[in-house]
Image (tube, rainbow, N blue to C red):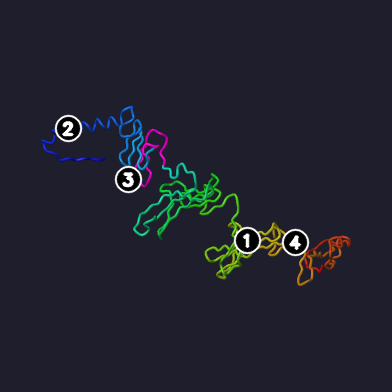
């Protein structure tokens, strides 16, 4: 609001009242009539220095305002700027409207006396339709992006959500409802480079709590402690079906069998230092009529063919 104060004496009213009357008549004639004004402007126009009134539009720095308030130049406000809500669908702040060539568009926030140009900047770069957009934060303080209530934080591209942080701190990639501290759904995790001096470059080292390291095709305990490999919570271990099985409930090991019946149960031949051994079953025969015992034979057929019954069996390793 612009106010004007004039200190006058009683005798001045004699000439002030006619002067104000003439001024009002002049403005009405210049701005409010349907004829071109004597001030040299078109119908309904009034120019007061840098301010132009055209119909219901006001221009500052322009004689052809196209909006209710059209300003060509900088605007400085020593106070808040508010856009109140109305019955219309929404309100917007647009920067760079009506561009005919590329240029930067940005908002700067200045909240300290050190970074006086900007401490935080939201910017769209100037290299065309595929320009980068950046969020820039200056200083050693944290750049925080958070939901104050229990709502999740979503990040994504191509119009879809690729990463989610939900209430409680769980992080999901490929899922918006992670049930673990870190969950990857619909894909795999790959480490393609390594700068750790203890591993080869490009081997993809994964280190857990400085105790266990996956380095290329190796599993290493950093502290030299025992490496425990378990299946679920029962301690069993199975490699490629029945190739190698550890049954922790019976303390048995099976090679070639998934159900070992002995401490070491091997189905197949064994080779030691170039010599091949195979399991062989021997039988001892007994003649109940004569009381004779036969030596250990290679098969049950030999025992029954001699008229004897099988008294006992045993397994040995024979050379292949």
Q: Main secondary structure of the magenta part?
A: loop
**For mark 1, what is the residue?**
248
Mark 3 or 2: in front is 2
- In space, the residues marked 2 and 1 are separated at their CA atoms by 111 Å
Q: Nearer the viewer, residue 106 or 304?
A: 106
Query: Visible in this render: residue 178?
Result: no
Earlier in the chain: of badge 2 and badge 1, it is: 2
> What quarter of the picture does the N terminus occupy?
top left
Counting other residues with Cα less than 10 Å from the Cα at mark 3, is it few (<14), some (14-19), or many (20 or more)?
few
Q: With 24 as the anchor, is 167 left or right in this view?
A: right
- Give the secondary structure at mark 1: loop
**For mark 2, what is the residue?**
17
x and y percentages locating residue 46 in the rendered image: 32, 35
- In space, the residues marked 3 and 2 are separated at their CA atoms by 39 Å
Image: 297 above or below 40: below
**For mark 4, what is the residue?**
267
The picture quadrant where one finds residue 222 is bottom right
First to last magenta residue range: 65-92
| Residue at (11, 38) in percent of width and height | 9
- In space, the residues marked 1 and 4 are separated at their CA atoms by 19 Å
Mark 4 or 2: in front is 2
């Amino acid at each position: 609001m612009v106010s004007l104060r004039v200190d006058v004496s009683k005798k001045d009213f004699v000439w002030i009242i006619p002067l104000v009357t003439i001024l009002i008549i002049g403005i009405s004639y210049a701005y409010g009539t349907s004829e071109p004004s004597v001030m040299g402007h078109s119908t309904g126009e009034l120019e007061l220095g840098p301010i132009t009134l055209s119909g219901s539009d006001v221009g500052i720095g322009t004689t052809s305002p196209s909006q209710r308030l059209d300003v060509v130049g900088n605007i400085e406000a020593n106070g808040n700027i508010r856009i109140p809500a109305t019955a219309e669908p929404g309100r917007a702040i647009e920067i760079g409207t009506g561009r005919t060539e590329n240029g930067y568009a940005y908002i700067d926030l200045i909240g300290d006396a050190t970074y006086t140009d900007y401490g935080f900047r939201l910017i769209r770069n100037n290299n065309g339709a595929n320009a980068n957009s950046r969020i820039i934060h200056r200083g050693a303080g944290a750049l925080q992006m958070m939901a104050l209530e229990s709502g999740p934080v979503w990040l994504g591209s191509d119009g879809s959500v690729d990463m989610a942080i939900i209430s409680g701190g769980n992080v999901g990639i490929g899922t918006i409802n992670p049930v673990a501290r870190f969950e990857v759904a619909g894909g795999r995790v790959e480490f393609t480079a390594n700068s750790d001096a203890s591993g080869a470059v490009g081997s993809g080292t994964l280190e857990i709590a400085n105790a266990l390291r996956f380095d290329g095709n190796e599993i290493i305990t950093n502290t030299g402690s025992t490496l425990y490999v378990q299946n679920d919570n029962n301690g069993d271990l199975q490699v490629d079906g029945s190739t190698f099985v550890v049954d922790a409930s019976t303390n048995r090991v099976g090679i070639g069998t998934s159900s070992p019946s002995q401490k070491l149960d091997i189905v197949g031949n064994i080779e030691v230092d170039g010599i091949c051994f195979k399991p062989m079953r021997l039988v001892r025969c007994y003649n109940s009529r004569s009381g004779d015992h036969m030596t250990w034979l290679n098969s049950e057929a030999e025992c029954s063919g001699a008229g004897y019954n099988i008294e006992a069996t045993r397994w040995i390793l024979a050379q292949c």
